[in-house]
Image: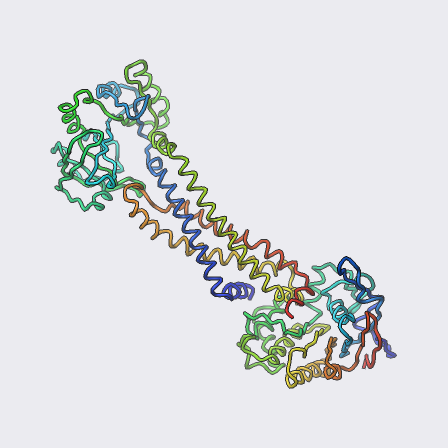
Amino acid sequence: MSTAEPRTPVVEIRGLAKSYQRGGQSVAVLSGLDLDIFPGDFLALMGPSGSGKSTLLNLIAGIDKPDSGTLRVNGVDITRLSQSALAEWRAHHVGFIFQFYNLMPVLTALENVELPLLLADLGRRERRERAELTLSMVGLADRSSHYPSELSGGQQQRVAIARAIVTDPTLLVADEPTGDLDRVSAGEILNLMERLNTELGKTIIMVTHDQRAAEAAHSIVQLEKGAIERGAGAGR
Amino acid sequence: MFLRLVSRNTLRHKLRTALTLLGLLVAILAFGLLSTVVDAWYAGAEGASSTRLITRSSISLVFPLPITYRERLRQIDGVSTVTTSNWFGGVYVTPKNFFPQFAVDGETYFSLYPEFILDDAQYKAFMRDRKGAIVGRKLADRYGWQIGDTVPLRGTIYAGNWEFVVRGIYDGREAKTDTNQFIFHWQYLNETVKRQMPRRADTVGIYILGIDAPDRAAEISELVDAQFRNSLAETLTETEKSFQLGFVAMTEAIVVAIRIVSYLVIFIIMAVMANTMAMSARERLPEYATLKALGFQPWRVGGLVFGESVFMAMVGGALGIALTFPVAEAFGQAMGSLFPIFHVSTGTVLLQIACSVFVGLVAGVVPAVRAGNVRIADGLRAVA
């Protein structure tokens, strides 16, 4: 994603390539991809199945490594980080929102939100206060002691969003965040994400098949066979 | 939070956890019980005194020694007391009522066994009555014998019907003291034998020698055996512990078999537990992948599985250890006089704890490594 404005991209991707081994053959998923994402972007990655959008999201989030190319986040080339350093980097710089929420079923909503803070240098009380504050930001203060099984899908996804933002990460990555929700709940989640982007200035990268969800984003990158087919509106 | 996650994960599948805990409980209990059986096997040797030597026929224990040796034994340097004992082998009502019976020299015997606590008045009553007998507390309790009761025994080695009157009941100074014995006068035995089987009279099964210097045990034993070398009844003298271990050695194969079975039980539960942990870890791979995505290092994620495995093993082990005591007590009573001393030792409890920890550690290793090394993208995909 290029922009005419002389701003520094928060994510700078150059010549990114990734392939997988299937049946003894190497299948290229991404080939020489270039992309810039700027602070405060709300970017939707779209494309048919197998186009490489989830792979790209995983690479940006630092949960997978490319075969070649560079991927800088705030100037740090995360492709050069060791697995251990990458884990630490994720803990401080990435907030995840998954399609199926991925909450710990044995922890309450508040404990789930508090979970990433275990990796931060915070005291027990401060962790708890920050988790409570974040949970109230997503409108679930009254559900703090509820377990995921006691919450609706929309509520679970809001807990997941609270968990994603509680560490104030550089990037929020969302993989089909509305994919498992009904229309009303999906609308609420998209509104919440828009608020996080507009009010808190969060940089959001979202993979989606849902046109309505993509419309909530401020720019769309369309992937086709591992390459960017078209990008629009990035870098407001 | 980490510990909370471990404990809550443990209770996630209540039935599975309950069954695994039950398996652990039974395994640790069985291990403790079998170890206690092995301990009981060695109880005689454990209760042996270092100040007592046993002199018996060098050919075999079944060959008696002449009573005339007593005076010569008293003369040996280092021997302070000499007493005698004969295995009687009588049957009380039915053969299943087995308990050890010894014909002893009442005047000297009890001074060599200070671990037998006997009331002075009872001892005097015993000494006054040629048919008197002293019985251990456990034995008296088992058959409800009171002082003054007549106990009939049918002789197997010394034929005939014998009658004894309980004149005293001794207690043990320590838990390892055998209070399952029936002790009576050698004179009563010898007088009867003299009348019925004169050739077997004036003999004893073993001599028990009291020595003041345990560090001279080997030297004194050598002196004793040298005294009777080239005689009609050569002797073999050894410490009481060696003498008792000689009996254990006769049944060593059984002891080895029991030990093997006890460790086999632990091995089986380890396999069961490893399977449980592997199953749990496999089901939770998406959660572990999520934790790793959030930035948790592999060792922390693996630690969750490992912690759960050790936690479960410790809880199951603790329950098994707690149950070992009452079960061993009941088992000991059911075994009657077969195991006169049947106590769960500190060593057994420590072994049970070690086994529990070992099971937890080993069962958790592979699932923990697998959970820690899960590829995030693969683990997250498994959720869908």
Figure coloring:
rainbow
Residue occupying the point 45% across, 62% down: B18
Determine whether, in the image, residue B384 is placed left or right of residue A150.
right
Q: Whole-percent x and y of residue B298?
A: 64, 59
Asked whether B309 or B116 is in front, the reply is B309
Q: Residue furthest right?
A: A4
Image-quadrant location for residue B98:
top left
**In which quadrant of the rendered image does the N terminus of chain B lie?**
bottom right
Q: Residue furthest top?
A: B230
Q: Whole-percent x and y of residue B51?
A: 32, 30
Q: Whole-percent x and y of residue B363?
A: 54, 53
**Number of dots carrying numbers:** 0
**In which quadrant of the rendered image does the C terminus of chain B lie?**
bottom right
Image-quadrant location for residue A121:
bottom right
- The answer, for residue A109, to whether it is visible in the render is yes
Residue occupying the point 37% across, 32% down: B250
B286 versus B205 height, above or below: below
Determine whether, in the image, residue A154 is placed left or right of residue A219.
left
Q: Whole-percent x and y of residue B103?
A: 21, 31
